[in-house]
């Protein structure tokens, strides 16, 4: 097979969040990484007296969790404060990320209204000059792939 | 600007909604080119508009037709002469 040529770095990815899933606020300037967990599908199997292998059946897709690491800042409308408040109030949010960035034609992956299931408060380390970071996880039933029209 | 038909699911940032496959959208040239090249849209098929055959009216026929204004309003031009009196 000829080597593929469409590979790219996701360092300029776009990350957004939205309360209603219509207008997404760009949090790319705060988000440092998006780490989607594996989405799995329920499956089952049974062995019969005849044959040598199992009969395997597929069930529903299971929810998935996605972790986003963000720079810890203390502004009122900054992502940390918005996420912290949403976590405490159980407010659902839609999240999306586009590995190729916010450009027309780029694939974007959008969650359903997701529950923020985890919040990692800012860490500290005297032995580093790195920015103070925090993180959160959200759980969504699915992620929808679409192509951006900016 | 030109019209395209979505092949894949698109997200319109300007309208804040998904564009379903099969839906016709209007895109500027650059966006249309990018999405066309990436196989996300195709040019929309031009709908053939049915046109009524143009009938030429003869001078005589035009003259014989009453002016619609006269029928509706009467000589005063008032839409409801009773109310105005």
Image (cartoon, coloured by chain):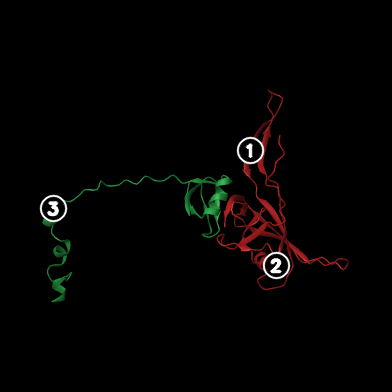
> Residue A4 in the image: x percent, y percent?
70, 41
Q: Secondary structure at mark 2?
A: helix
Q: Nearer the viewer, mark 1 or mark 3?
A: 3
Task: Name the foreground residue: A10 vs A141.
Answer: A10
Q: Give me the disc on residue A58.
A: 1
Instruction: Measure how far apart labels 3 and 2 are at the Cα level.
Output: 78 Å
> Residue A15 in the image: x percent, y percent?
66, 59
In the rendered image, which residue does mark 2 sit on?
A: A80
* Residues at circles 3 and 2 in contact by the CB criterion of under 8 Å: no
Q: Secondary structure at mark 3?
A: helix
Q: Are marks 3 and 2 on the same chain?
A: no
A78 displayed left or right of B42: right
Q: Are marks 2 and 1 on the same chain?
A: yes
In the rendered image, which residue does mark 3 sit on?
A: B61
Name the image quarter holding residue A24: bottom right
> Residue A101 in the image: x percent, y percent?
65, 56
A143 displayed left or right of A70: left
């Amino acid at each position: 097979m000829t080597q593929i040529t469409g590979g790219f770095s996701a360092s300029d990815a776009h990350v957004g969040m939205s309360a209603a899933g219509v207008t997404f606020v760009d949090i790319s300037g705060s988000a440092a990484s998006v780490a989607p967990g594996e989405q799995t599908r329920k499956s089952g199997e049974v062995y019969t007296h005849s044959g040598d292998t199992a009969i395997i059946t597929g069930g529903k897709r299971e929810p998935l969790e996605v972790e986003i690491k963000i720079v810890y800042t203390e502004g009122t409308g900054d992502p940390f404060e918005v996420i912290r408040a949403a976590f405490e109030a159980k407010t659902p949010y839609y999240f999306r990320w586009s590995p190729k960035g916010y450009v027309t034609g780029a694939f974007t992956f959008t969650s359903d209204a997701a529950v923020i299931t985890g919040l990692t408060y800012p860490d500290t380390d005297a032995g580093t000059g790195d920015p103070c970071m925090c993180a959160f996880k959200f759980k969504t039933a699915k992620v929808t792939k679409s192509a951006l029209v900016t | 600007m030109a019209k395209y038909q979505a092949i894949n699911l698109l997200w319109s940032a300007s309208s804040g909604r998904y564009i379903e496959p099969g839906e016709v959208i209007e895109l500027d040239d650059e966006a249309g080119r990018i999405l066309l090249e990436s196989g996300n849209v195709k040019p929309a098929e031009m709908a053939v508009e049915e046109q009524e055959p143009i009938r030429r009216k003869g001078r005589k026929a035009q003259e014989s037709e009453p002016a619609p204004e006269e029928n509706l309003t009467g000589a005063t031009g008032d839409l409801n002469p009773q109310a105005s009196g």
